Amino acid sequence: MADTIHLLPDHIANQIAAGEVIQRPASAVKELLENAVDAGATEIRLIINDAGKSLIQVIDNGKGMSVIDAQNAFARHATSKISTIDDLFQIRTMGFRGEALASIAAVAQVNLKTRRPEDELGTSVDMEHSKVTATSPIAHPVGTSISMKNLFFNVPARRNFLKSNAAELKHILEEFTRVALAFPEIYFSLTSNGQDVYHWDSGSFKQRAIQVLGNSYNAKLVAVGEKTDYLTIAGFVGKPETAKKTRSDQYFFVNRRFIKSAYLHHAVANAFEGMLSKENFPSYILYIDVDPSQVDINVHPTKQEIKFEDDKIIYAFVQAAVKHALAQFSIAPSLDFSLDASIQSLDAIQQPFTDEKIQSTASSSLYAGFTQKNQAHFIPKSDNARTQDWKSFFTDIPSTANETSQEGYNKESFIVKPSSMGLYKETKGLQINEDAALLQINNTYIIAPADNGCVMIHQQLAHERVLYEKFQKASIQPHATQKSLFPVVLELSVSDAILLEEIIEDLALIGYEIEPFGQNSFIIQGIPADVISGNEKNAIELLLEQFKHFSGDIKFSKREKLIRCMARQMAIKAGQSLTQKEMHGLIESLVECETPNITASGAPTYIEFKEEYLDGLFSK
C-alpha cells in the first residue's frame, strides 16, 4: 500500500504561508513599510494603483542591499534581525520573522531595485511564483524600491474575495497612518492612481498627530507624559469634545509598534469616566516604551496583539497617566487651592466690612445656624404662612383650573372626559386619545392617556421609527430635494471622502444632492425637502461618523446601514421641548407605521400601562 503523507512543493507551501501574512493589499503595505523603517530610511514613499490590486510600490532611502542579500531576501524565514533564540525576546525592529517578502513573492509579481552607499551599481531582481526570473545590475539611488503587481494573480479565489477599491483603500490608509504615527521623524507620502493623497514632512510627535487628525485638533489635544523605572508613557488624548461614536482615532503603540488592546482601551475609558456618554469613545495617540523582555510580540500573525508580562501594572500606569494629564489641563475635576486673581478683585473682598454689615449679618438666621446650638435644622415660620387642609388640596379643583398656564397649555384639558376619547387608529395596539392634552416629561417622554390606562412614548425612538420607514420607501421612490440657495462646500479627510463617494448614490435617493468638488472636497447642492437648511455640513459629517459606527455589522447591506444612520441622526433628540401640536403629529405618524412598537434596532418606542396594572401599584 502506497504511503499517503508527502511533503508539499515549495511554491504551494509558500502560498499557504502567504495566506497568514498577506490577507489583502493593506497587509503587504504594512510589511513593506515596516521593512523600509528597519532599513533606516528617512523618506518613504508609497505608490498604489487600484487600491493595491494592480500595484503596490514602496520606495525608501535606507541602507539598501547587496546582490546576494537582494536574492536571499525572498527566501522563507530569511532575516537580518534575528541570529539567536535570545534575540526573539529583545525585539526592537518592526519586521523580524523573515516571511514578508517570501509571502509577497508567492502571490504577486515582484521587482526589487536596491543599492548600498558603498556600491557603484545597484541590483534588480524579478520574482514570480516564488522563483527568481531575472537579476541584473542597474543604476539606482541609495535605498530600495519594491514593486508588487497583480496581487493574487495566481490565486484567483483569494482575489475574488477582495472588497471594493474604496474598502481596500480604506484599509491601506489605516496601515499607512499607523506606521507614519509611530515614526514622525520620517517623511511619508502616499500616491493613489497618480494623485497625491498624503504628504507628511518629518517633525515632532505633536506635528505628526496634527497631520493625521487634522488642524482642528491643534487646540484639542492634551499632552500625556509619565516616566517610571518600569515604562514610559507619552502621547496625546483628545479633549472630551473630540469624542466620536467610533474608535477611528484611537492608537496604542508599544515600542513604536501599533497594537490593538481592548484591555488598555478600558484603562483610557476609565480615566474619562464622567466626562463622556456611554456611546462615545475618546480620541488618543499613546506611546508606551517598555523593556522588550517584558513583552511577547509574536503571539499573533499580524503582530497587532501582544502579551505583557504584567498586564495590571500597564493598565494602572495608563489610567493614571491619562487622568493626571486631564487634571493638569483642568479638564477632569480637581481641587485647586491657589488664589485666583479675579476672585481677589471682587467687591466682597475689596470693600471694608463695616459695623452695620457685621450687625446685619449677626442677626440673620443663617449666622445663628452656624454659631448657636440646635439651629442647623431650624426653619423659621414665614409671616404670611397659613395652615391648609392638605386633604382638600388634593380633592378640590382650584377655581383657576381652566386658565391657561405659562407653559401654553390649558390645565382643564388634562381632565379626560369619557365622551372625548377618540382614537388615532384602532389597529396595531397603539390607541391614543386624540382630543386629550399630552404631557412631556424631562423633554424626552410623552405621556398620553388611552382607553384603558396610559402610554409612555420615547420621542427620539418613536421618531427614529417614523423616519426609518420613510427612508425605506424612498429607496423605491426617491425623496424630494430642495435646492440650496447657497451651496455648501464640504472638505473631508481622505478616508471620509472615500466613504462619501461610496454612499453618494444612496444619499441621492434620500434627498441629498452632493457632487465632487476637487480633491477630498464636495459641494452640497440640495438637501431633503423636509430638513431645515443651515446645518448641512455638520449633518453630513455626523452621518459619516454614524455610518462608520454601523460598518462593523456585516449582516446589514450598505443601504440599510445608511437608512438607519439617517433615521438616528435626523430624529428629534431626547431633551428637546415639543409643543402639543408637535407631540400629536409625532404620535399620528408613529401610528401610521407598519411596525410602530419598536425601532429598527429592536428598542421599544413606547410602553403601555394598563389600568389594571396601575391599580395594582396602589393596592394594599
Image (cartoon, helix red, strand yellow):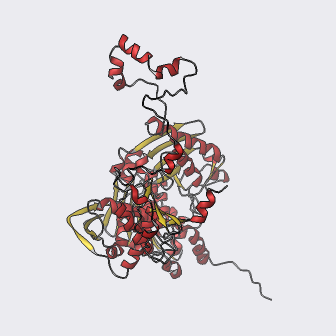
**Which of the two residues, 12 or 303, is positioned nearer the viewer here?**
303
**Residue 280 coordinates in the image, percent (x, y):** 47, 54
**Which of the two residues, 611 or 209, is positioned nearer the viewer here?**
611
- Residue that sits furthest to the top in the current view: 355
- Residue that sits furthest to the bottom in the current view: 1
Q: Give me the residue at 35% from left, 44% from top.
A: 219
**Which of the two residues, 244 or 7, is positioned nearer the viewer here?**
244
Task: From the viewer's perspective, tell me whether residue 159 is left or right of residue 51.
Answer: right
**Residue 542 coordinates in the image, percent (x, y):** 38, 60
Q: In this view of the protein, can residue 348 be seen by the observer?
A: yes
- Residue that sits furthest to the left in the current view: 485
Task: From the viewer's perspective, tell me whether residue 500 is left or right of residue 87.
Answer: left
State the quadrant of the C terminus.
Answer: bottom right
Above or below: residue 364 compared with residue 275: above
Q: Give me the residue at 39% from left, 79% from top.
A: 473
Q: In this view of the protein, can residue 113 be seen by the observer?
A: no
Q: Give me the residue at 66% from left, 47% from top.
A: 309
State the quadrant of the N terminus.
Answer: bottom right
**Which of the two residues, 553 or 64, is positioned nearer the viewer here?**
553
**Residue 434 coordinates in the image, percent (x, y):** 41, 69
**Residue 514 coordinates in the image, percent (x, y):** 28, 70
Q: How many marks?
A: 0
